[in-house]
Image: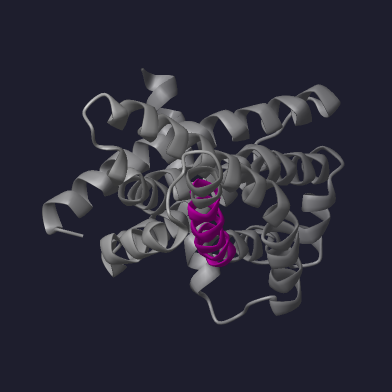
Amino acid sequence: MLGLLGEAGRLATFITRVKLAALTPWVFFGETLKQCIRIGYFSLPVVGLTAIFTGAALALNIFVGGSRFNAEQFVPNIVVLGITRELGPVLAALMLAGRVSAGIAAEVGTMKVTEQIDALHTLSTSPFQYLYAPRFWAAVLTLPILVLIADIIGVYGGYLVATGTLDFNGNLYIKNTMDYVTGGDVIGGLIKAAVFGGVVALMGCYHGQNCQGGASGVGRAATLAVVSSAVLIFFSNFLMTTLFTRIGL
């Protein structure tokens, strides 16, 4: 129990210091832009492929389930709702957890074990401002953009399956989708995405910062970063879904 509380305290302290560094006027814009490209742009293919296959599979499953109650016509409504409110943000965040969080942990962990972070302290450069804050901002800013693109691609994946396999009328499918989705559905998903982006970056930086034991320690830090990011993504998703439901978003 003492170990658990101690770890929670170290994590809370680390997150506070990263957020304070991110809010200070001194910002490394070049490093932040570089991380935006690495985290956001290079993650677009895997997020797009995940979204289109998810939308296609979701449409098929909803059609099979709806046919048992003569409710096949609700496929476009449920697909767009499921993608924008839940599956788009969560799956995009999980893809970033596997690709970005592990990469950040391995990169920072390697710098830790090779004493490059100690060299930053020697040069009077804070790693929280130079290393962690740019990655935090990049993940928070780019993941909502990725999720918005994933929403469009995911809905299009459902459209392709519905019109190509399930004999839906294309114009009617699009009309039902546009009539059913609301701004609150999209905004709620984008808010979740921003939170998930912060979680992914913070977990990668935290486990990389606490890396010990050479090459094996770097691998362990990358694994812990992915696992902790995934768990916190699901936990924060539940909390935000509960909150959005109560406030009517």
- Point 30% across, 39% down: residue: 238
Q: Position of residue 200 (x, y in %)?
A: 56, 46
Q: Is residue 196 above or below residue 121?
A: above
Q: Position of residue 135 (x, y in %)?
A: 64, 59
Q: Position of residue 249 (x, y in %)?
A: 21, 60
- Point 46% across, 50% down: residue: 89
Residue closer to the observer: 1 or 19: 19
Residue closer to the observer: 114 or 65: 65
Q: Is residue 165 above or below residue 151?
A: above
State which region is magenta. 141-158
Residue closer to the observer: 135 or 154: 154
Question: Magenta segment: does it hold 147?
Answer: yes
Prevailing SS of the magenta stretch: helix
Q: Quadrant of residue 174?
A: bottom left
- Point 42% across, 45% down: residue: 12
Quadrant of the image for the N terminus?
A: top left
